[in-house]
């Protein structure tokens, strides 16, 4: 009986836990690749480089670098950042990413390329020069889950990075594990209800 109760509770918590926060996955690998011609080229080169590299889920995307997160060096780095987030209702959102990508990079929103820069990008905490950071303006997004993916190549010096979002009419906020939580899929709600039903059955049997 005790094991059954714990299993029911675990099922309910697992179903509901995925709705707690945006998921920020930061990946790096080694690459000597030059600046690429297209956004898809960046995606292909970086994906290959990070496949055997480092990966970590971040609590906040502010002043992030390869060396600060993984301690594995400051040169010849491929970067991939994947932010899975959700909207409870449709809205218009803008995104910006301050990076240090000496060989440029690209941004995808829900699998579609939305920004590409092949120049030396050195954001250095300043959003005053649009050539030095990525910008996605006024994207009309439906209710539900979305994915923002950022690819980049750095020759040296691994400066801090930041990724932010802004709902139309509001100011920018940095992505953290407490913002824009993914929306549970219908099957997740079914798991939650199933777990709660199992707990209810346990309670009824104990009263009997």
Image (tube, rainbow, N blue to C red):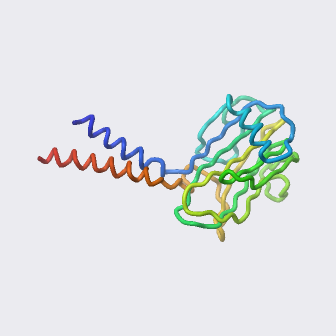
- Locate residue 118 relative to residue 172 in the image: left or right: right
Identify which residue is drawn at 20% across, 47% down. 203
Q: Can you give x and y, in whole percent of width and height, for residue 154 in the image?
A: 81, 38
Q: Indicate whether 153 appears above or below 186.
A: above
Identify which residue is drawn at 48% across, 51% down. 20
Going by the picture, which residue comes out furthest to the bottom? Answer: 169
**Which of the 4 image quarters holds residue 180?**
bottom right
- Locate residue 149 relative to residue 1 in the image: left or right: right
**Which of the 4 image quarters holds residue 1?**
top left
**Which of the 4 image quarters holds residue 45?**
top right
Identify which residue is drawn at 64% across, 65% down. 167
Going by the picture, which residue comes out furthest to the left? Answer: 208
Q: Can you give x and y, in whole percent of width and height, for residue 22 in the image?
A: 56, 50
Q: Can you give x and y, in whole percent of width and height, for residue 104 in the image?
A: 83, 45
Q: Indicate whether 64 appears above or below 110.
A: above
- Locate residue 128 relative to residue 169 in the image: left or right: right
Q: Can you give x and y, in whole percent of width and height, for residue 49 in the image?
A: 74, 32
Instruction: Depth check: give the residue in front, 112 or 78.
Output: 112
In this rendering, the count of numbered labels is: 0
Instruction: Depth check: give the residue in front, 175 or 47.
Output: 47
Identify which residue is drawn at 41% across, 53% down. 189
């Amino acid at each position: 009986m005790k094991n059954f109760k714990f299993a029911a509770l675990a099922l309910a918590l697992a179903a509901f836990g995925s709705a707690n926060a945006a998921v920020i996955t930061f990946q790096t690998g080694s690459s000597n690749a030059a600046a690429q011609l297209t956004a898809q080229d960046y995606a292909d080169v970086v994906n290959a480089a990070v496949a055997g590299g480092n990966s970590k889920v971040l609590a906040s995307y502010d002043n992030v670098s390869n060396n600060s997160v993984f301690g594995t060096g400051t040169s010849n780095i491929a970067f991939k950042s994947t932010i899975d987030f959700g909207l409870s209702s449709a809205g218009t959102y803008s995104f910006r990413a301050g990076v240090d990508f000496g060989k440029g990079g690209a941004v995808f929103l829900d699998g579609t390329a939305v920004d590409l820069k092949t120049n030396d990008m050195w954001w250095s905490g300043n959003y005053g020069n649009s050539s030095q950071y990525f910008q996605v303006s006024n994207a009309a997004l439906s209710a539900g889950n979305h994915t923002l993916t950022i690819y980049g190549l750095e020759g040296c010096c691994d400066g801090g990075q930041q990724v932010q979002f802004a709902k139309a009419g509001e100011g920018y906020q940095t992505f953290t594990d407490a913002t824009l939580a993914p929306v549970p899929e219908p099957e997740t709600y079914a798991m939650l209800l199933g777990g709660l039903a199992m707990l209810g059955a346990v309670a009824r049997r104990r009263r009997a």
